[in-house]
Amino acid sequence: MIRLTRLDGSEMYLNPAMIEVVEESPDTHITLSNGNRYLVLEPARVIIERIVLHQARILHRAAPSEYKKYLQRRNAEKFRPYCKLERQ
């Protein structure tokens, strides 16, 4: 969600995946895919920058990382799975 400011100064959070059109004609108009329209104080370039940062944050969190130590097994070379098979 990105934070935007309405014309009356109140803050709102908007899902950037729902944004279809951002128009700037003195005020900035945002049209969502469900037909809702909002007037905000931020210019279009700021809204676009926030959308790009939001998407980058999502991709960064989703990317596999070699630093996620909780996924690594300690002493992996010594690890021997134990499975007891009953032979008849």
Image: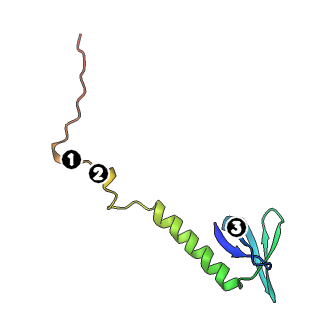
Give the foreground label among 3 and 1: 3
Asked if 62 appears above or below 46 in the picture, the reply is above
Q: How many marks?
A: 3
Q: Nearer the viewer, residue 50 or 84?
A: 50
Badge 2: how crowded within 10 Å, few (<14), some, or many (20+)? Answer: few
Three-letter amino acid code at the position of disc 3: Leu
The C terminus - image quarter? top left
Tell me if 39 is positioned left or right of 80 in this view.
right
Mark 3–mark 1 Cα distance, whole angstroms, equals 45 Å
For marks 3 and 1 on the same chain, the one whose residue lies earlier in the sequence: 3
Position in image of residue 70 (x %, y %): 33, 52
Label 2: which secondary element = loop
The residue carrying mark 1 is 76
| Gap in angstroms between the C-alphas marked 2 and 3 | 37 Å
In the rendering, at what x and y percent does residue 46 appear?
65, 83
Residue 62, percent from left and from top: 47, 60
Q: Position of residue 83 (x, y in %)?
A: 25, 27
Cβ atoms at labels 3 and 1 below 8 Å apart: no
Residue positioned 29% across, 51% down in the render = 72
Quarter of the figure with residue 32: bottom right
Q: Which residue is mark 3?
A: 14
- Residue that carries the numbered disc 2 in the rendered image: 72
Question: How many angstroms separate mark 1 from mark 2 (CA)?
Answer: 8 Å
Q: Earlier in the sequence, mark 2 or mark 3?
A: 3
